[in-house]
Image (cartoon, grey):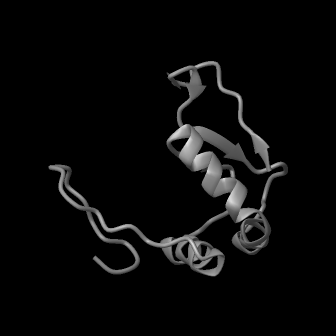
Amino acid sequence: MKIGSDPDQKMQRGKPFPLVLEAATAGVNFVELQEYMMSHHEVVREAASQYGAVLFNGFDIRSGEEWASILYKTGIKQMNYVGGAAVRKLIVGNE
C-alpha cells in the first residue's frame, strides 16, 4: 500500500484530506487488503484520526460485503449514520 499523490488533492489544515491509500500493484483483492488491515489496523486508524478520513483507492473490492468483511475482521466498529439531510441507502450492516 502506498500514499497516493494527486495534484488536485484537497488540503485541510495543511494536510491532505482525505488521506489516499492506494494499492501498490493492480488487482489487490479483498483478501490481501484484509490481511494488510489485520496487521496494520492501528496505523490506518491513527491515520484516519490524524487526517480526518482515509480513502482506499485501486483495490479490487467487488461488494459492500467484502468491505464489511475487512472491517469486521480487523475489529473496526461500524458507525451508525446519525442526523444529516443526505439521502442514503443501507448497503451492508445494521442501522
**Residue 45 picture quarter:** bottom right
Tally of marks: 0
Q: Is residue 43 above or below residue 19?
A: below
Q: Nearer the viewer, residue 46 or 23?
A: 46
Q: Residue furthest left?
A: 85
Percent x, y of residue 86: 20, 50
**What residue is drawn where x is 38% and y is 67%?**
79
Q: Is residue 22 above or below residue 63?
A: above
Percent x, y of residue 76: 55, 71
Percent x, y of residue 60: 68, 62
**What residue is drawn where x is 79% and y is 43%?**
2
**Can residue 54 be seen in this snapshot?**
no
Q: Nearer the viewer, residue 89 or 82?
A: 82
Where does the C terminus fall, quadrant-wise? bottom left
Q: Is residue 83 above or below residue 3?
A: below
Q: Is residue 74 above or below residue 81?
A: below
**What residue is drawn where x is 18% and y is 56%?**
83
Q: Nearer the viewer, residue 10 or 66?
A: 10
Q: Residue furthest right?
A: 25
Percent x, y of residue 58: 68, 50
**Can residue 5 be seen in this snapshot?**
yes
